[in-house]
Image (cartoon, coloured by chain):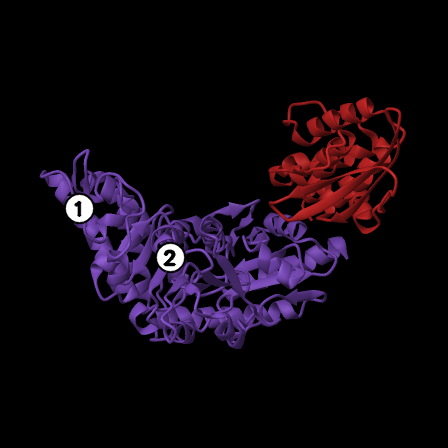
Amino acid sequence: MSSALDELYQEVILDHNRRPRNFRTIEEGRHAEGYNPLCGDRLTVYLRIQGDRIQDASFQGSGCAISKASASLMTESVKGKTIAEAEALFERFHRLITRSVEDPVDDLGKLSVFAGVRQYPARVKCASLAWHTLRAATDAKNEVVSTE
Amino acid sequence: MTSIPLTRTELDVRSVREDFPILRTLAHGKPLIYLDNAATTQKPQVVLDRLVRYYTHENANVHRGVHLLSERATDAYEEARKTAARFLHAAETQEIIFVRGTTEAINLVAQTYGRVHVGAGDEVVITVMEHHSNIVPWQMLCDERGARLRIVPMTDEGELRIDSYEALLGDRTRIVAVTHVSNALGTVNPIRRIVEIAHARGIPVLVDGAQAVAHMAVDVQALDCDFYTFSGHKLFGPTGIGVLYGKAALLAAVPPYQGGGDMIRSVSFERTLYNVLPYKFEAGTPNIAGAVGLGAAIEYVEALGFDRIGAHDRDLLAHGTRALEEIPGLRLTGTAGDKGGILSFVLDGVHPHDVGTILDREGVAIRTGHHCCQPLMARLGVPATSRASLALYNTRAEIDVLAGALAKVRAVFV
């Protein structure tokens, strides 16, 4: 496989695709649905929020390896964070996957495995779908967010 | 260059490939293998040259000026119309309307013929395998008119259920709209039979020929369809140009689509007299260069001959079907008995989007997604498929590279 592909499909991403974490519903809480009309990917993000803190996060749905792994890692990273912290993390994550070559790479811990997405503009939406859906769930707008 | 002797039924693919300069492209450092022909086809040098010649020596507006260039442009444009009429075996040249593409052609029919004939409680019959462009214009019409869209089902193999189709047609059916060849399954529908059944009840039929015209000779009179549509860019021609064929009597009896220049005979603030066919439906300055380029593309495929093109298609499809069926976990979607050069598939445990990205890095261009057929994807029970679609410049060796690349996909994910 070419190096760009290796960078995109890192072992962590393949692992989260095969065995997504927090792949379940949360009965008592908020949820929002995300939809990527380009590829038909749909996922639902569930949150249990106390005060302004995300106590639990999970997701369900179907999608490509990038969108599934991104949803899985997103739920892991936002658990225990405040809504504002999660929002700030989304902004850093979005910069990571859309940055230009010259830009410095932000260390986002486990989320840094998505740095390779930058080289695949068509896949940025796959990586960001779960995050857009997270934002909709924290806004508690019960509407479908779309990447288009 | 040594030339391979051409037999009556064999396409000289090596020489055909020389005609398409873009095929020399390297994709991510590998030879481009273009298998996205159902989305759009590449253009031969003769089409590119024709566009340059038009803009270099003939460019002017059509049907207006008395000067030399205007005459040249008008001649070239109207010559392209004759070429398209001959290509479809239309009875009359005035039955060829130039449009932007298949989508516009179908919208034109829905908004003119449809608005005249479809009223509250009426029905429009389409099929489950239609492209969005042959669904949405009818849905819009039905919503506006309080009419109902009825859907012809298909078998698991992807063949239309003709018995169900027949049963769907009733007193309120005003038009049938059906694809000639399915862009997502490859199914070639029995248009002659479909038209016969509709006509027995006095119902006209529109055929979406977008996926057919690059692969088979189309004779609209033999099919006896009432409307036939196709896009130039899927026939090795430019984008932004397409053809609506309609029987003259039907087209003459409905109002214009858009108002503007060229579609009028005389205008006053009190009253406008519309122009005759085909100009009544061609408001504004048309895509003159596009039409001229399309004419060149038609002449190109005619020179190769559909007997040769068809034989080449069948050989590639058979080879591709065998090669893909050998890949563990791969399931072909669309296995109709009569099938065009479409290899649509799902790979267990791998999302089509990931398939597409990995193939792209191997130089192989395919389409992944719902192929603008979301209702069909729902019928198949999949969110998306991967699709390799073939054209006359593809080779068995390219399909072998596709199969090899799919093995790599499996190695990453399975």
- Rendering coords of residue B232 (x, y %): 36, 53
Residue A122 appears left or right of A96: left
**C-alpha distance separating marks 1 and 2:** 22 Å
Q: Which residue is mark 2?
A: B230
Residue found 21% across the figure and 42% down from its top: B262
Closest to the observer, B13 or A125: A125
Please name the residue shown 71% across and 22% down the image. A104
Looking at the image, can residue B43 be seen? no
Chain label for disc 1? B
Instruction: Name which of mark 1 and mark 2 comes first in the sequence.
Output: 1
Under mark 2, the amino acid is: Phe
Among the chains pictured, the one given red colouring is A
Q: Chain of mark 2?
A: B
Give the number of callouts. Answer: 2
User: Secondary structure under badge 2?
Assistant: strand
Q: Position of residue B330 (x, y in %)?
A: 68, 65
Q: Amino acid at mark 1?
A: Thr
Seen as rendered, the residue at the extreme front is B120
Left or right, residue B34 beside residue A43: left
Q: Quadrant of the C terminus of chain B?
A: bottom right
Q: For mark 1, what is the residue?
A: B74
In the picture, measured across the screen, residue B214 lies left or right of residue B357, that is left
Classify mark 1: helix, strand or loop: helix
Q: Give the quarter of the figure containing the N terminus of chain B.
A: bottom left
Q: Which chain is purple?
A: B
> In x, y percent, where is residue B256?
28, 48
Horizontal side, residue A23 vs residue B330: left or right? right
